[in-house]
Image (spheres, rainbow, N blue to C red):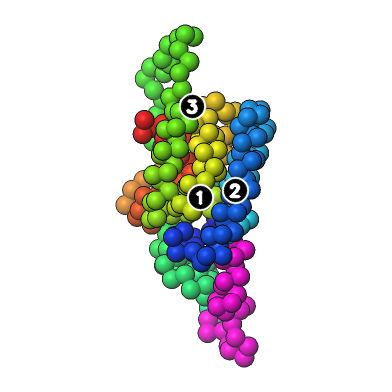
Amino acid sequence: MQSRPLRALPPSKLWPKHWTDAWVRACKDFTGVLRSAVDDGSAIAVLQALLDFLELPTRILLPRLEQQAKRKGSRSSRNALPPGVPDPLPNDVCENPQQRAAVKRAYEDCWSKAMEALLSNGAAPNDEKTLQQMQDMHPDRPEPLRMNACSAEIDSELTSTIKAKAYLYKAAAMDRTCVDVFGWATDFLFPVRATAFLGQLARLTAKIANARVHETFAVVLTSGSLLALHKEGQTRGTETPGSATQAQAGQHRFSPTQVGLQVRAAV
């Protein structure tokens, strides 16, 4: 999965027709995979279906985005300068990796990312001091956490498939969402929200929202790690890999991969 290049995608409503046709066709073909996995119910089958689902934008949209970039003659690297044109800023001019990263972004015509590379404080080092600061920010509870008593007689679903589908249908129209760490954005669902694909995705979403999946799903959907980030004017904090970009972009972000929690919170 490659999420970074997919940030260049426009909202799905602005895709070329052949992009939309290919995306709809791929999602319709994937409908049977989702249906079989949820019907099977085994942890391996459902997890594999989730991973295949997360990979859809990379498999279907990324090649088309790269083809479009080649046709437009975009420079994707420093080595893509026109023949005979000298490099205006050789590597030996850049004094540190931060400057080299900014120059690379500039050559890719990603000026906001170039500024971000120059101004970002980066991640905290992986050492005992960082670990201690993170632990100090999350002290132990004064009392042990007591779980709510669960009655064996109550077996109702917190999130039904109908509610999950209604939420996905509404979220698909939000075209201001960012691409997440898996390369997904909610508006990718807009071209297929009237197809059977959305119904099968709603079944999987409800299953995840009701916590009826293996604990491995939590690791996958949260990217499995935390990053300690330097915050300007603040102490070092912990953020998920996706939330760092969200904070820098200054806009709300969620995706179908996070929608299980969103649906559960909404209902």
Who's the residue at 57% across and 71% down the image? 68
Q: Position of residue 135 (x, y in %)?
A: 44, 34
Residue at the disc numbered 2: 28
Secondary element type, mark 1? helix
Query: Vertical placement of 57 versus 205: above or below?
Result: below
Q: Amino acid at mark 3?
A: Asn
Q: Magenta stretch? A: 62-89
Residue drawn at (58%, 89%) of the image: 85
Judging from the image, what secondary structure is the residue with disc 3 in?
loop
Q: Is residue 160 above or below residue 134?
A: above
User: Which dot marks residue 26?
Assistant: none
The quadrant where residue 148 appears: top left
Mark toward the start of the polypeptide (3 vs 2): 2
Q: Secondary structure at mark 2?
A: helix
Residue 128 percent across, percent down from the top left: 51, 40
Report the side of 137 relative to 105 (left or right).
left
Mark 3 against mark 2, which lies toward the viewer? Answer: 2
Residue carrying label 3: 210
Give the Cα distance between marks 2 and 1. 8 Å
Q: Residue at x 43, y 16 (%)?
A: 147
Cβ atoms under marks 2 and 1 closer than 8 Å: yes
The residue tagged 1 is 192
Measuring from the top left, give residue 126's x and y in whole percent.
Answer: 54, 46
Kindly indicate whether the residue at mark 2 contacts the one at mark 3 (C-beta within 8 angstroms): no
Label 3, label 1: how far apart the Cα atoms are: 24 Å
Residue 185: x and y in percent read 47, 51
